[in-house]
Amino acid sequence: MKEKIISILLNPIFIALTISSVLIYLLPNYFSRYKADLLENGVYHKGRISYFIDLNGDNISEQIVCGESNSGNAYFQVFTFNGSIIDQWNFYGHFPSYERKIWSSDVNTNNSSEIYIITQKNDSAFLHIIEPMKADGINLRKKFITTIQGKDNHFDFKPYTFFISDLDKDNFNDIVFSINAGFGVFPRSIYSYNLRKDTVQSSPFLGNYAFINEIIDINEDRLS
C-alpha cells in the first residue's frame, strides 16, 4: 500500500497538476470580473421589434423599438440604455412586412447616426430619414421612391441592404438600397437617394431579387 501511494505521488502527471494548481492559486488577480448579457438585434415581441444601435458615438447603444399604431401607421421609439424614452417618431404608411426593418448609418459624417425606414401606403413606397440624437438633425418624411405593381390587389415588397456611398463624387454620400416586389414582380431594382439634391435614381429592372454586397468604381471613371 505504501509503495502504491509513493508511486502515485511520484507520478509526473500528479506532480504537474499539483504545481499548476499552486501557481494558479498564487497568481495575482489582474482581471476584473464582468457579467456579459447578450442583447440581440431584431428581437420580435408582441408585434414590436427592438434594435440596439449606438446612435451618438458614445459606445453605448440606444434601444430602438419599432411598431405600428392602432391606425396602422409605422413608428419607432428611442430609449437610452437605462430604459428612459428619448422620443417617438410617427410615419405615414405601415412597414411593408412584419419584419419591421430599419437601418442606420451616418450619411453626413457628423458622428450622429440616422435611422432609415421604408413605409408602404397602398401601392407606394416612401423613404424616411431621422437623426434622433440631434435636436436640429435630419428629419426627412414621406419621400416617394416608387410604385409597386400589385397582384390581386395585393402590393407586397421588401426593402433590403442600405449602403452609404458617394456615387457621383460630389463629396456627399448617397443612400443606396434595394426594393424587391413579391408576386407583383415589379419593381426589383436598386435605388439611390441624394439628400443634398433631394433626388432619387433607380437601376433598370433586374428581374431576380436585387441585393447589394459592395459598391465600387469598376471602370475608374470616378463614378461608383
Image (cartoon, rainbow, N blue to C red):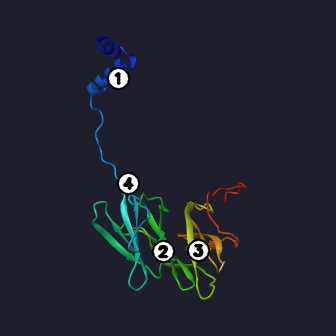
N-terminal-most mark, 4 or 2 = 4
Label 3 vs label 1, nearer the camera: 1
Give me the C-alpha separation between circle 3 and circle 2: 28 Å
Residue named by callout 2: 98
The answer to whether residue 109 shows anywhere in this view is: yes
Frontmost residue, 91 versus 9: 9
How many residues crowd around disc 2 within 10 Å: few (fewer than 14), some, or many (20 or more)?
A: few
Extreme-front residue of the structure: 1
Residue named by callout 3: 199
Residue named by callout 1: 17
User: Marks 2 and 1: CB-CB under 8 Å?
Assistant: no
N-terminal-most mark, 3 or 2 = 2
Locate residue 135 relative to residue 145 in the image: left or right.
Answer: left
The amino acid marked with disc number 2 is Tyr
Residue 179 percent coordinates (x, y): 60, 72
Residue named by callout 4: 38
Extreme-top residue of the structure: 3
How many residues crowd around disc 3 within 10 Å: few (fewer than 14), some, or many (20 or more)?
A: few
The amino acid marked with disc number 3 is Thr
N-terminal-most mark, 2 or 1 = 1
The amino acid marked with disc number 4 is Leu
Give me the C-alpha separation between circle 3 and circle 1: 70 Å
Element under label 3? strand
Q: Is residue 11 above or below residue 34?
A: above
User: Marks 3 and 2: CB-CB under 8 Å?
Assistant: no
Asked where in the image residue 182 lies, by quadrant, the reply is bottom right
The amino acid marked with disc number 1 is Leu
Element under label 1? helix
Mark identifier at residue 85? none
